[in-house]
Every structure is written in C-alpha cells, then in structure tokens.
Amino acid sequence: MKKSRWQRFKEWWTIDHVVDVVVDFALLIFDVITSPILITIRIIRHFIGDWVVGGIKNFIKRIAYWFARKREYRLKHGHGIFRTYWWLILLSPFILFFLFLWTAVMVGIAEDFNTILELILTGASEAEWDKWIESD
C-alpha cells in the first residue's frame, strides 16, 4: 500500500527531526544576527561546529526522550504529573536561578570580549589593563 505524502510527513516528524530543525533554525538566526564575525572565529566554528551542534542536539534529544519515556510510564501506571515530576518541580527555581546566572556571566563576557581581545593581541601593558579596568 502506497502511503500518502501526509502519512510520510507524519512518520518523518519525530522528536529527532523536530529537535534538529529547531536547533538548525536557531543557529541560522544566530548567524544572521552575528554576521560580522572575525575570519578566525568562522574557521574555528567550521572545524568544531559539527561537534558543538551535535552536542547541543544530542543534549536536547536526551531531554525530549526522557520526557517522552516518563510520559509513557506515567500514563501506563496511572500516575499524575506531580507524582512523576515532583523533584523537577521542586528543583526548578534553583535550575532557573543557575541558568539566569550562567546567562548573565556569558552576556558580561560577550560585552567586553572585543576589548579584551584587542588588549591581548596588541600586547597591552599592565598600565593599559589597569586603565581599562578602572574605566568600568
């Protein structure tokens, strides 16, 4: 029996494919926003890009599959959401707080990255570093 296009599309639309499409789309948007990147960064990104993208995709896929397995188990045994995810619900404020801190640190590093890179590449003296630190 020949499958319709819609049936083939529904079979293709798995957790793996959804995660791949979402991550690729997010990375594409990130590329468009940060288009004036240094050539060396592009070269480094080319060589480790597959490793980083693969790691991000695998991490997200593991989380998605974990939730899918938990849902199957929960429905099979008739458990409620709180009984299944109680520890995740209780830990969520701490998880969100650490994600917020990590984001704040990454944004802080990104804001001064060009200045720090310039000081390193030009071989800035200690006095120039002190002047830069005091200007903040």
Image (tube, rainbow, N blue to C red):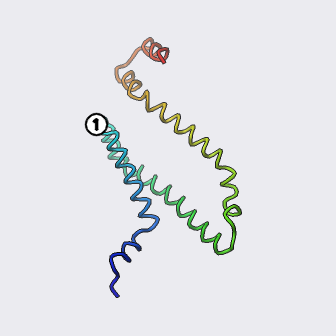
Q: Is residue 104 left or right of residue 20?
A: right
Q: Quadrant of residue 36?
A: top left
Q: How many marks?
A: 1
Q: Nearer the viewer, residue 40 or 98?
A: 98
> Which residue is rendered at x = 52% and y = 39% of the image?
103
Q: Quadrant of residue 115?
A: top left
What is the three-letter code of the residue carrying label 1?
Ile
> Measured along the vertical axis of the image, is residue 8 above or below residue 2?
above
Q: Residues within 10 Å of mark 1 (few under 14, many from 20)?
A: few
Tell me if residue 83 comes above or below residue 98 in the rendering: below
Outermost residue on the top side: it is 127
Q: Is residue 20 left or right of residue 99?
A: left
| Residue 69 point in image, percent of width and height | 58, 68
Rendered position, 60 above or below 134: below
Q: Is residue 115 toward the left or the right of residue 80 in the image?
A: left
What kind of element bears circle 1? helix
**Which residue lies under the disc numbered 1?**
39
Which image quarter is the N terminus in? bottom left
In front of the other: 74 or 61? 74
Question: How far from the left and from the top, in percent, is residue 110?
Answer: 44, 32
| Residue closer to the observer: 102 or 121 | 102
Residue 19 position, x and y percent, is 44, 59
Spot the residue most to the bottom. 1
Q: At 68% across and 73% down in the image, what residue appears?
A: 78
